[in-house]
Structure formats: C-alpha cells, structure tokens
Amino acid sequence: MTQPDNASNDTVGSVHELAVLSRIFPLLPSASAALLGPGDDAAVLAAPDGRFVVTTDMMVHGPDFRFAWSTGHDLGWKAAATNLADVAAMGARPTGLVVAIAATRDTPVSLLEDIASGLRDACAELAPGCGVVGGDMSVSDTFTLAITAFGDLEGRAPVVRSGARVGDVVALCGDAGVAATGLRLLFDRGVDEHGTPDRSLADRLRAEHPDTVGAQLAPRPPISAGVAAALGGATAMLDVSDGLALDARRIAAASGINLDLHSELLGSDPEMALRGGEDHALLATFPANAPVAAGFRVIGAVTEGSGVTLDGEPVEGVLGWDPYAGWNGQAG
Ligand SMILES: [Mg+2]
C-alpha cells in the first residue's frame, strides 16, 4: 500500500491560509524593483521615475475562463499576460504584480501552486524582472483571480490613446485573430453533447491546434514592444483585448480621427483579425516620416473622420468580444 499523498489532496477548505501561503510563496517570481517584497502588510516598490503606471484586470470563472479548458498554469499565465499587456500599452516596463484570489473551498492547493507557477513563467518570459510583490486570498463560490500591475515609464511620456494624428501610420505588433480562432475551436469542439466545456476534448484540441488554442488559453503578448514603441515615437497605443475593429475605434474616438485598415495587410483571415480579441497585440500609430518600431508592421493609416474603416469602407456590425453581450453580440 502506498501512503496517501496528503499534500496533493489538500484543498483550500481543508488547510489553513498560512499553510497555503507557505506552499505558494516559494513559487512566486520576485520583482527586481521591490525594495520590500511579500511578508509585510504591504510591499514597497521603487518608482525612480517619480510616477508609476497602474492597472488591474480580473479573471472570473465562467465569463473569463473555465477550469475545464484552462489549467492552473494557463490561468496564472493569462492573468499575468493581460495585465502586463496593459502596462506595455502605456509604453511602460512592468515592475510588479499584486494578486488577489478568491477560491472555492474545494480548490486543490496544488491548483494554486500551478497558478503561481504560471505567474512565474509568464513574468520570466514576457517581462523579466517583473514579479509578484503581494496579494490576498479569500474564499468564494466563484473562483476569481484579480491582478493589479505596476509599471515604470523610465522618464518617458505615457503613450495614450488620444495622440493619433491624420497622416500617421497604423501598426500592429503581435497576432490578430489567433486567440479568437482558438476560442471558436473550444466552443465548437471543446464541449460535450450538452455544450458543457470538457477537459479531455480541450486537451485533444490543444494538441491538434497548439498555436490557436494555446494562444487563447495562454497568450504571449509582445510586452517589450511597448517600450520599443514609446522609444520609437508612437503617438497612440493600446493592447488589442476585444478585437482590432473595436480597439481601433477606441483610439479613433480618443484621438478624433479615423483609422483606415488595409485588408491585404491583415493576414489570411482579415475578418477574424478584425473581430477576434484576446491576442493582446499592441496597436499603435506612428508618424509617417519615420520607420515604425521594431516588431511592428504597418496595417493602415490615420485619416480624417471618426471611426474605423477597412479599405476606406466603414466596418459594419458588431465589432468584437463583449464580456456582457458575448461573442459577436450573442451571449457566449
Ligand atoms: Mg488594455
């Protein structure tokens, strides 16, 4: 008889918070900007610039992710990646994350360890030097992971959405429509006959389509390109979370201009590129008289007007993912 492995059977509801934290802490990435890391009532982060960028993004079980599709590692990775992308989109370098988790009582502690490993691996690959400086844990009927991210502008002006000017070029760094293709596959073939998300179907799908399903479950936004864009003179920028058409419209509205996208520059499936979200590519505008920053490719031009056009024609219909309305406006 083998001894039961108690550590692997522990759930959040069966052990004390201190025991959970003692297992998670060693897995978390440390932040090079932390003057005082986790362990006190609050952390202390260096802000040599005199300002810091701060943003938050939350993952709620159901609308934002499903454990039937995402592993704990995926969830930690994606939660880090989406927050890092928001910091990058300001032209800042991510420095620290604060992580709050509300877990159901039956959540295995090993799942929280996997989330911590996902946070660690995402920081190491996407934003070296950025780490987790603090957090909080509670219990809830709905598993929720909320991250607050901090970033350093390193003396540069933030790149905001309102700076695009007529004559600028529109450029993109990262994928457009790849994660949404993965999400479509998961909704089409990652569910059982009752439409319920299924782990074994999702695992098989991911093995068959690692690029698209992997991009949906664990996206790899080009975080360092945010600083490169700022240094390269970007006039406006954001990360594409809800689809190119919808997010381009946000720059257009803030800047009072039109973004004309060119279909032949949007890849093999312009429609998916336009309306598919969650790749967290960086969409920026640059002055036309200089090359765009390294890693970016030109996909259009800033013109007079207000909104988004494709080859000069207005982009019609529902523009992308909306957490309340669902995919293409249909509750998802
Ligand atoms: Mg964003």
Image (cartoon, grey):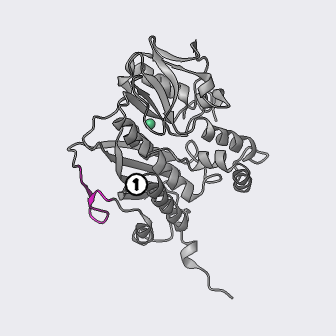
Q: Is residue 34 above or below residue 65?
A: below
Please tell me whether mark 1 sits on a helix, a strand or a loop: strand
Mark 1 residue crowding within 10 angstroms, few (<14) / some (14–19) / many (20+)? many
Q: Is residue 41 magenta?
A: yes
Percent from the top left, x then y, of residue 299? 54, 26
Q: Main secondary structure of the magenta part?
A: loop
Return the residue at label 1: 99
Q: Is residue 10 left or right of residue 35?
A: right
Residue at 21% of width from left, 49% of height from top? 48
Viewer-closest of 58 and 232: 232
Q: Residue furthest right?
A: 193
Residue 150 can be seen, yes or no: yes
Q: Quadrant of the C terminus?
A: top right
Percent from the top left, x then y, of residue 263? 61, 23
Q: Is residue 280 above or below residue 16?
A: above
Q: Is residue 113 magenta?
A: no
Residue 330 can be seen, yes or no: no
Quarter of the image where one finds residue 166: top left
Viewer-closest of 256 and 70: 256
Quarter of the image where one finds residue 207: bottom right
Residue at 41% of width from left, 49% of height from top? 147
Which contiguous range is marked in magenta?
A: 32-47
Viewer-closest of 215 and 188: 215
